[in-house]
Image (spheres, helix red, strand yellow):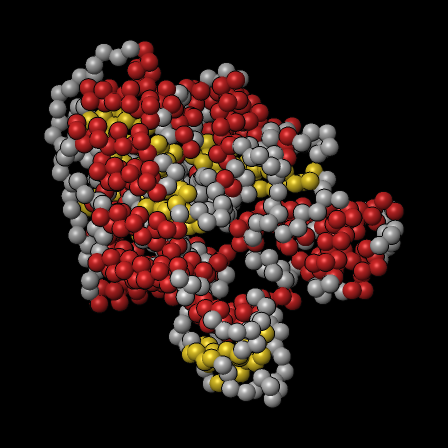
């Protein structure tokens, strides 16, 4: 079988990308401008400077053995010889070099694959049930719909410049194994009056303010899946929040508009698109597999255990599917190559491979004898094949190991948990079906909100020392009209996480016979039990007594947020700031003794330092850093400077209140109101002269108007004046502020009817 179709428009985009790549390489294109171009091609910079990740789309996880062979070769030639399966069923190549971008993208396109829309504010990889086409409970196979919609969305220019990412999912049954009930647009297969179609959900998503998707239609004909997806996308494109990325997802727009207005807008778009035409999709049905009479060969004890854990009997008589659990979603390129060649040999024309959103591989449409013959190779591909499914089903993101957004390193933590479970002799096979998911930050790449037991990274502090920690969520339910996310119950240090998890799971094994599910237990006393258990593990030793809790798992250095940019891990920074703010407010309410006044001064001075990339530990370092970043910059009045010297006095109460007030003006990019106001200089004869460069950026949307302005300034000499024209609204609100934040002087802003003239002097 073949997957989605790469349209001519994507090939044209690659031609343009090649030119832009060369422009950046020779210095004629700014780094920020190139970032806005490469990310929608699925190319991200990793935490290690000058290394990149390339994300490849696999619609519904569909991949052929020949495509797997191509990815394996690319990983060996250009990456780290590992294929990383993502939590949207795609593939990532890590540690790619800049010089290799073009040959990688070219080879992907030659193989019928692309990274277009793999990142940025785009239509992302469409997910689906990995058992699509073979599940006994499915209404019909949704694979053709996933592939057709992927192809159609790839050809649309408006799929690559949305306010934020746009996610679509399909499920073949109400069990919702594809995740349709918690994405932007979700489809669950239905048959009504003999016609195939879908119940439709919209405006869901995980991350900041996670939201279960809202039911929109009880039945949509299968021919209209693009029509509906495009209509919602156009409403999102026009009405979504482009100014604040933290409030830009579709679920926030739904909340802002309300269900009634949202429905009206979507229905109006449906009518418009129908009138315009070109809204049909071509569904190519997959060939059916004829049933066969095939028994299961005699298995030894080891093979039987594997069969019981990981083999699924398909709806097609005589055929089976094997799940290959991958540790951390990683697959050796060399072993992937062996698997691709073997599958091509024994099942040349069959649909035999899917990658799942659980970061595992599914080998399908094989008879029992063919599957058993693969077992030795499967053990080489993943040692988890011989272990309990609860370990194989664990889902984690890369976290701070490579991701610039990561706070903690869940890949190290999950290995520590696995080791502790084995050490404690936990009966893991009794936990079959139990899901443990972990993310390194609130962004939900590890899908922590839809697990039985979920964790996401945060920062806690013992005294002046931060340490890695996790929020605990539990009790998610997934299914049509029953989906709910795990309840956020408590937090715990990363150091104690293995002990906590082991004790909790041992307790659950003892009592699980009394409950329908883990979620039922959570609703009937389990939440309180977890809270008390977390409290048992709530404390860590002071830094001077034991430094182990201050290292993250697999990390070689003491845990720190210093040097990480505001946009990279602001969630972790907020954790630290909020912890100090809470302690500061408590101190202000207590008796103002000499000891407490000293504590108030320390907390007030330390509270916002992390927003400046500082993580001073001693009191002297804290006070000096505060003076540098807040007193000398004018963010806090110089009248408070004497309070930083000598014995603390009652005046530090006013200092504390000033710091808390300043924090109240901080936005999501960790900038304060005083910094966000452009320093506009009075008009003089000197700056009223003709500009050195003039550009008209009316009609250019944010953020490209700023990107273009920045490129203009990068080509000018210090002191030269750039004059630009900007539209009213978001452009005039954002561009001058962004320019000023980079140190340039905004000389003048003048309103002219429906646009603005802005004059900027390069620093």
In the current view of this chain or complex, which residue is farthest to the bottom?
Answer: 685
> Does 750 appear above or below 718?
below
Decide which of 60, 179 is in the foreground and name it: 60
Decide which of 380, 226 is in the foreground and name it: 380
Residue depicted at 70% across the width and 38% down the height: 462
Q: Position of residue 725 (x, y in %)?
A: 46, 79
Count of labels in the image: 0
- Answer whether residue 211 is visible to the viewer in this image: no
On the picture, is 92 further left or further right than 411? left
Report which quarter residue 355 is drawn in: top left
Q: Quadrant of the C terminus?
A: bottom right
Q: Quadrant of the N terminus?
A: top left
On the picture, is 570 further left or further right than 373? right
Decide which of 716, 616 is in the foreground and name it: 716
Residue depicted at 34% across the width and 54% down the height: 41
Q: Position of residue 460 (x, y in %)?
A: 64, 40
- Answer whether residue 367 is visible to the viewer in this image: yes
On the picture, is 257 further left or further right than 408? left
Residue depicted at 60% across the width and 30% down the height: 495
Q: Position of residue 165 (x, y in %)?
A: 40, 54
């Amino acid at each position: 079988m073949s997957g989605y179709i790469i349209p001519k428009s994507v090939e044209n985009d690659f031609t343009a990308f090649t030119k832009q790549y060369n422009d950046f390489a020779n210095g004629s294109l700014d780094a920020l401008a190139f970032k806005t171009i490469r990310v929608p091609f699925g190319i991200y910079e990793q935490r290690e400077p000058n290394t990149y990740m390339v994300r490849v789309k696999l619609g519904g996880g569909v991949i052929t053995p020949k495509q797997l062979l191509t990815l394996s070769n690319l990983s060996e030639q250009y990456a780290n010889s590992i294929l990383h399966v993502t939590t949207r069923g795609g593939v990532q190549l890590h540690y790619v070099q800049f010089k290799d971008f073009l040959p990688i993208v070219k080879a992907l396109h030659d193989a019928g694959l692309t990274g277009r829309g793999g990142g940025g504010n785009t239509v992302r990889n469409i997910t689906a049930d990995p058992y699509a086409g073979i599940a006994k409970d499915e209404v019909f196979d949704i694979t053709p719909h996933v592939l057709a919609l992927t192809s159609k969305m790839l050809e649309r220019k408006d799929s690559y410049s949305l306010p934020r990412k746009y996610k679509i999912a399909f499920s073949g049954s109400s069990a919702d194994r594809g995740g349709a009930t918690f994405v932007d647009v979700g489809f669950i297969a239905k048959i009504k009056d003999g016609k195939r179609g879908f119940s439709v959900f919209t405006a869901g998503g995980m991350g900041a303010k996670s939201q279960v998707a809202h039911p929109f239609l009880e039945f949509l004909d299968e021919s209209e899946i693009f029509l509906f997806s495009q209509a919602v996308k156009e409403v999102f494109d026009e009405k979504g929040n482009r100014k604040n990325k933290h409030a830009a997802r579709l679920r926030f727009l739904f909340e802002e508009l309300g269900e009634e207005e949202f429905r009206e807008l979507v229905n109006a778009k449906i009518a418009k698109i129908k009138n315009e035409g070109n809204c049909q999709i071509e569904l190519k049905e997959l060939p059916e597999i004829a049933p066969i009479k095939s028994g299961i060969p005699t298995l030894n004890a080891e093979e039987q255990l594997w069969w019981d854990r990981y083999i699924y009997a398909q709806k097609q008589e005589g055929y089976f599917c094997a799940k290959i659990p991958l540790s951390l979603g990683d697959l050796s390129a060399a072993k992937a190559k062996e698997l691709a060649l073997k599958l091509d040999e024994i099942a040349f024309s069959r649909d035999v491979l899917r990658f799942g959103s659980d970061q595992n591989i599914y080998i399908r449409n094989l008879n029992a004898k063919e599957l058993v013959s693969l077992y030795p190779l499967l053990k080489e591909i993943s040692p988890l094949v011989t272990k309990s499914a609860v370990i194989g089903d664990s889902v984690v993101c890369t976290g701070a190991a490579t991701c610039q957004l990561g706070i903690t390193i869940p890949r190290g933590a999950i290995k520590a948990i696995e080791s502790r479970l084995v050490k404690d002799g936990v009966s893991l096979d009794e936990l079959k079906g139990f899901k443990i998911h972990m993310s390194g930050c609130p962004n939900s790449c590890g899908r922590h909100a839809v697990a039985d037991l979920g964790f996401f990274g945060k920062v806690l502090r013992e005294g002046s020392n931060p340490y890695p920690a996790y929020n605990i969520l539990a009790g998610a339910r997934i299914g049509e009209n029953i989906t709910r996310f795990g309840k956020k119950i408590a937090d715990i240090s990363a150091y104690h996480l293995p002990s906590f998890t082991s004790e909790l799971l041992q307790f659950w094994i003892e009592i699980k016979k009394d409950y329908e599910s883990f979620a039922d237990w959570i609703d009937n006393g389990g939440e309180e039990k977890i809270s008390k258990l977390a409290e048992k593990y709530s404390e860590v030793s002071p830094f001077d007594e034991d430094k182990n809790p201050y290292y993250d798992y697999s990390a070689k250095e003491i845990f720190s947020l210093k040097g990480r940019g505001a946009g990279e891990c602001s969630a972790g920074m907020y954790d630290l700031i909020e912890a100090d703010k809470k302690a500061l407010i408590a101190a202000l309410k207590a008796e103002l003794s000499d000891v407490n006044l000293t504590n108030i001064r320390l907390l007030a001075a330390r509270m916002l330092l992390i927003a400046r990339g500082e993580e001073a530990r001693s009191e002297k370092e804290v006070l000096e850093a505060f003076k540098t970043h807040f007193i000398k910059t004018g963010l806090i009045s110089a009248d408070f400077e004497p309070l930083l010297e000598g014995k603390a006095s009652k005046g530090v109460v006013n200092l504390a209140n000033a710091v808390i007030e300043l924090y109240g003006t901080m936005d999501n990019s960790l900038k304060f109101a005083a910094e966000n106001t452009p320093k506009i200089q009075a008009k003089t004869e000197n700056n009223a002269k003709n500009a050195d460069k003039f550009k008209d950026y009316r009609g250019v949307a944010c953020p490209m108007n700023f990107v273009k302005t920045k490129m203009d300034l990068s080509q000018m000499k210090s002191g030269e004046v750039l004059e630009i024209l900007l539209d009213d609204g978001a452009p005039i609100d954002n561009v001058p502020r962004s320019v000023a934040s980079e140190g340039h002087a905004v000389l003048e802003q003048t309103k002219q009817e429906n646009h603005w003239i802005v004059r900027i002097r390069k620093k």
